[in-house]
Image: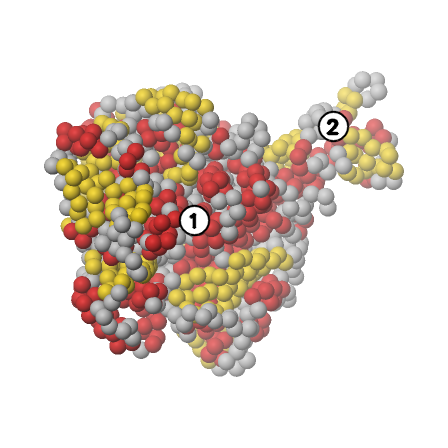
Amino acid sequence: MKIKFTLNQEIIEHEVSPNKTLVKMLREDFDLTGAKEGCGGGECGACTILFNGKPVTSCLLLGVQADGQEITTIEGLSQGNELDELQKTFISTGALQCGYCTPGMILTAKGLLTENPDPSREEIKTALSGNLCRCTGYKRIIEAVEQAAKNYR
Amino acid sequence: MKYVGQSIERVDGIKKVTGDLKYVDDMKLPRMLYAGVKRSPHAHAKILKIDTSLAEKYPGVKAVVTGKDFPKKAGLYLTDKTFFAVDKTRFTGEAVAAVAADTEDIAKEAAELIEVEYEVLPSIHDAREAIKDGAPLIHPDLGDYRIVPIFKPVPGTNISEHFKLRKGNVEEAFKKAHRIFEKEFYVPHIQHTPIENHVAIAQYDRDKNLTVWASCQSPYAVRAALSDAFDVPLHKLRVISPAVGGGFGAKAGTTLEGIIIPLAMKVGNRPIKLTYSREDEFVSSYVRQALHSKFKTAVDKNGKLLAVENEFIWDGGAFTEYGVNIAKSAGFAAVGPYDVENIHCDSYAVYTNNPVGGPYRGFGMAEIHFGIEQNMDHIAREMGMDPIELRRMNAQKPGGTTATGAKVDAACGLEETLEAVVKEIDYHTPSEQPSDPNKVRAKGIACGMKAPSMPNNAGSSAVVRINEDGSAFLSVSAQDLGQGSDTALTQIAAEGLQIPVEKITIKTGDTDHTPYEWQTVASRITYSAGNAIIKACDDVKTQLVNLASQKLEVPKEELILDDEHVVWEKDFTKKVPIRELSLGLQLEDGSGVHGPIIGRGSFVPEGVVNFDPETGLSEKPVVFWTYGAYGVEIEVDKQTGNIKVLKATTCFDVGKAINPELVKAQCEGAVVQGLGSAIFEEIIMKDGKFQNPNFTDYKIPTSGDMPEMTIHIAENPQYDGPYGARGMAEPAMIPAAPSIVNAFYNATGIAMNKLPLTPERVVNALKEHNK
Amino acid sequence: MKSFEYFKVKTVAEAIERLQENPDGSHILNGGTDLILRMKENHLHPDRVIDIRGIEALSEISFSKEEGLFVGACVPLGEMAHHKSVMKHYSMLADAAELVGSGQIRNVATMTGNLCNASPLADTATPALVLKAVMIVEGLNGKKEIPVNEFFKGVRRTALEKTDLVKGVRIPYEEGLQGSFQKASRRKDVDLSTVCASGVIIGDEYRFALGAVAPTPIRLPQVEKLLKGKEINQETIKQAMDLIEDEISPIDDVRSTKEFRIHLAKTLVQRCLEQMA
């Protein structure tokens, strides 16, 4: 099926089979491998991308559902070589270790801060609870989001 | 020191936050095929017949293999496993056959078309049954398996390792006891759940070179295992681990790599990828073994532990190629961080038809400390003593002995770590109770210890090359699994070379190009690879100093490295930049001396000796013990049974923190992973079949479960560690579960001898208790 | 996933037409967090999937005291939970919606979808029951309204025809209503309910509903009758608790035993009462 959508601020025309999930379409057809398939069931959040600015688990969306929508992946977060504030604070606070959950985690945080530029700690914890991390214990991730929120303002 | 001890930012941060880093599943190779696996639905069954004809004909299928194609056994310590079941299957989910096809979907569909005829055999799922005489044998040929000689299997039984520790005389000690305490504990199977599932790609070219890309902790161990199992010589076998999305032991040794090799050998130089689904990850990689433990402890009237008799029965699952070492490691640790003169310990690795047990962060220590640390609190209460005082009295201290009779190291910091957490959590002040009468809060403490459990000759090596611009390459095969080894090892190299971290690029994970590393496990890398790197830097220094001495005409002994220069220590203005010497020295007449600077270092720990096979005693069985403690405060909802960990504080004696923030980050992750094992995680099995192989029903902690954490570090230097460092990544998790369970007792008066403390178990225990 | 025909429809009429072409082999795609998962796991393999998210009218959410709350079928749970009228007048529904899955799921999943799945533990089902929600449906024979207490027929079975499309849920406004939603789960965030409960007091009338204790989410008519007009005290609570056991039929499963569900059912109803007091 033919679809037309905005991918990382670029308008794309693409042909995709209806039974291909959005995460597989991004990874296989566009080589945007930042979104990872950690569980395939919408539980781990590693496949999180921004769908019209809102974080969604792309393993539970079909590629064809991107038609007419705006998709942002981790690759689209930096402007060229300029890192987004969240990417900078994740590094500066040490909010990543193996890095596998990191793209999804950053995008969920981005979605949160776009909607709520001054979230409380509890709000951050709740927003991120759909992104599993086995390495960090979450502490620095939350600090990175708090710091980025300050930096954005 | 300029670089070591600094909390510099990770060197691999940018590629991870941008999604630029390619993990193995992100790799797309030209003409790549995909593997699909047919797995056994039975826990124990003879394979009578496999009909692959429908799969072979399925459009898009390029190759099909079954176990009979490659029946050679593999295994790290004991060669008891095959990558495919050969004559029989021993656990539900074992690979029986596989296909290679054009797409992942075709591969899965074709694999389903493989027809297997089984004769179901009686299966055993309780290690206490499997250990008995007369139990159905899961490995009748155990006696014929190759095994590293320090292990003691019992052929004709399901016991693949029996470690005995016999220290002093427990019988006499029990006779003298003021009191004797007996307790039993059980820890269920759990899984590591790295967020990245196992994945590997294999390619076999027509010149018989085999290349494997795998998310693995130990490329050299994978290489060795595959070479042996598939008769490929090492110089024609390349293993590359470009990135690992979490290991925790799950990606140590080998798991799925052997499934794709036979396929790769049949498809004429086409790469074949196998990516585990989350369900595969749960069922068919490694799990943490379940443990049935028994303790019998004798104390004198003051609370001094006189003797401990204990028994560990490890549910090793279908293959214990790795698990035998977990049984042994638990055996020689036996009583935890306490000085006990008389010990009688039997630790058994037992086969069952349960999923395959393997290394999980802690390697047996978390499992035994669940019992050890609860036992200590229990003894304290019974004796009317403060649990901290009981621990102080019995703690291993410099001058005392460990369980194997070795001297406790002069740098043993156990007491310091215990005092740190007692103070931080204010253990002796009871918790403030919440206003809600249905909730209750309390604090808990636990200690722990661990040593790297590795062969005495487990080696590390490093190569350092100086580039013409004075920058450097550091080549090691230590894997950064997230723990930060890329960064810490670069810091060690920077310190040794006096070249800044930003000017050193670390290269890892390619057996063709990065030199031998035994495995990235055991919390050994900072210590072992770190030492190899220091030696490699010393080698570079020797070469540079030789050349500089000629150029500057000063004695070699008076030259040092500083700030990217070789400098005369008597006059800092007499120096030569390292970059000028990178290709050797050029003399005034134009001629050259020496050539390119390449430093190499090899390290094996010294003086580590085997255990006595009968008594388990040894004067130096391990390179070091890492000690530490936890303090937690929890809140229990008495009506729903939910437990919240409000606060956690930990302190571990790391010798020297090469990068303090990375050390703390490891400790934070360990707290949360430990919390998961205490209150959420359990593999629910019915007749060996995993009932909850997904995140819907196997819950791990989310950000919402995170406690407030305060992490302390103690630094009593490891005498032979790089700048005094010793390993800490696994020790950091060990006291987590017992500290929470001890807090639970303090909150409710109930001792829980099984994990996890699910809401249902809590409510039932409260009901029982209130009767 | 097996292949299928995919239609993105622009109107309700178009959706029904597509359903009619193959009633047995069609499935509506709304949020998709349940459908796509089940298709990936091979529990479902429809011949055709009809994506209704392009139907503008279904993304509407509106409130008035006269009409009550209308939540269009395609309104995501996250949007619904943060809608000011929902937070003000139906806070228990907002509470329930906020506890479905993760933030990511809530950006896509819908209340209509949650109800149409008819899982016994659906978190928005018990609020719908006690708030007397009505399913606004259109089918081959035109428009119809199905009260939620007639909607659930069994595990994953509803009163809908194969050619019906749910356009949304309407919840009446009742002045002076007080409500509470309670959820028991293994983990605080992103977990299925072990048991969930909703309670409402309006005037002297009580309404209770429980999830995950029967093949469908259920009201508790006996408990409601017992408590009607009565004061809430230790005696009446005890009587209510005893009756709960008679009204529910929980099962053992991988998440819980039936005994524990009975315990949680009682606990949660008690907590509803405490919150509403």
In the rendered structure, the residue with mark 1 lies on which chain? A
Specify the quadrant of the image occupied by residue C252.
Answer: bottom left
Relative to B629, is B390 above or below? Answer: below
- Of the 4 image quadrants, the one containing the C terminus of chain B is bottom left
In the rendered structure, the residue with mark 2 lies on which chain? B
Q: Is residue B9 visible?
A: yes
Q: Which residue is mark 2?
A: B579
Q: Is residue C117 left or right of residue B345?
A: left
Residue depicted at 24% across the width and 62% down the height = C207
Dot 2 amino acid type: Arg
Marking on residue A129: 1
Estimate how packed mark 2 is, as few (under 14), some (14 to 19) or many (20 or more) residues with alpha carbons within 10 Å: many
Estimate how packed mark 1 is, as few (under 14), some (14 to 19) or many (20 or more) residues with alpha carbons within 10 Å: many
Q: Position of residue C89 (x, y in %)?
A: 34, 54
Specify the quadrant of the image occupied by residue C138.
Answer: top left
In the image, C244 versus B629, the foreground residue is C244
Q: Is residue B457 left or right of residue B226?
A: right
Relative to C60, is C172 above or below? Answer: below
